[in-house]
Amino acid sequence: MVSLDLLINAIVAGILLGGFYAAVTVGITISFGMLDIANIAQPAFILLGSYAAYIITYYVPVDPLVVGFLMLPVFYVIGMAVYRLYYYSFELRGEQSIQGLAFFFGLLFVAEVSLVLVFGVDYRFVEAPYIGPSLHLGIIDLPLRMLIPCLVSLVMIAVLQLYLSRSFIGRAILAVSQDGLALQLMAASPTRIKQIAFGISVATCSLAGTFLIIIQPVEPSIGRDYIGRIFAICVLGGMTSFPGMVAAALLIGIVESITATFYGPSWAPAVAFGFLLITLAVRPAGLAGR
């Protein structure tokens, strides 16, 4: 017989996990969903965010979340530089499909090997007052190391949604992959808009990477676990929709949490992707459509 207390806590844990998945996926929703750039190196940028938080907090007594926010401009500039290299090497010559995919795979490989050479394969972690304690609400346990990243993630996504829907650059980002010529007629450079959008997508990695190292210790190859999952959540959410992406992330998180609780962690990814396939079979455009 299923314990009601255990089920409720599994659902709550899944919601918190889904909040983290949303933070990890938001960059792919921008680069892949809105710009049609299959940035499979996204987990590498997330890991770089994790290790940046580890290095800075190791030498300076500062909260990891503060480091994540301080690193936003740095990762934004890195993202703009990476897109500029990608543009001149592939997109300008119309070779952004297979060659571009190989480019991002190379970035992923180089980043992972570099982290191994510098830090080794040992797990690294950070310390903060909220890593360890839990908030107890009746029968519900809320680990602060999961709750705080989940809440900050949702706030970050809400701010991005507001920026995309209310600002000129935000609306231009939404339009750039649909009609670049119309964007040029509005005196906006599609290349410049894509560069800004890609910078934003990579900048979100600093926070997502901080969330990751707060939730669990990290090592250089852990990013591989998220490549398939973030693309799956992006597609399930409808590619370009932040609300759809958040809903998809929460659903995947809940499915994984319930499966891990009652059937074991090894079954969680298989059941989650099975749920994805069934959902897309019923609604091919995803939860929010494209």
Image (spheres, grey):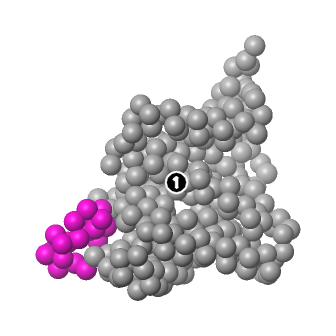
Residue drawn at point x = 69 percent, y = 32 percent = 259
**Prevailing secondary structure of the magenta residues:** helix
Q: Quadrant of residue 120?
A: bottom right
Residue 152 visible in this rendered orientation of the protein = no
Can you give x and y, in whole percent of width and height, for residue 4 in the image?
Answer: 69, 20
Can you give x and y, in whole percent of width and height, for residue 197 in the image?
Answer: 39, 71
| Residue 161 versus residue 256 in the image, above or below | below
Asked which secondary structure carries label 1, the reply is: helix
| Residue 290 versus residue 99 in the image, above or below | above
Q: Nearer the viewer, residue 111 or 245?
A: 111
Residue drawn at point x = 45 percent, y = 37 percent = 280
Q: Looking at the picture, which amino acid does disc 1 mark? A: Phe
Q: From the viewer's perspective, tell me whether residue 77 is left or right of residue 256.
A: left
Residue range highlighted in magenta: 169-189
Q: Is residue 185 magenta?
A: yes
Residue drawn at point x = 47 percent, y = 51 percent = 234
Residue beneath disc 1: 231
| Residue 46 versus residue 269 in the image, above or below | below
Can you give x and y, in whole percent of width and height, for residue 67 in the image?
Answer: 63, 73
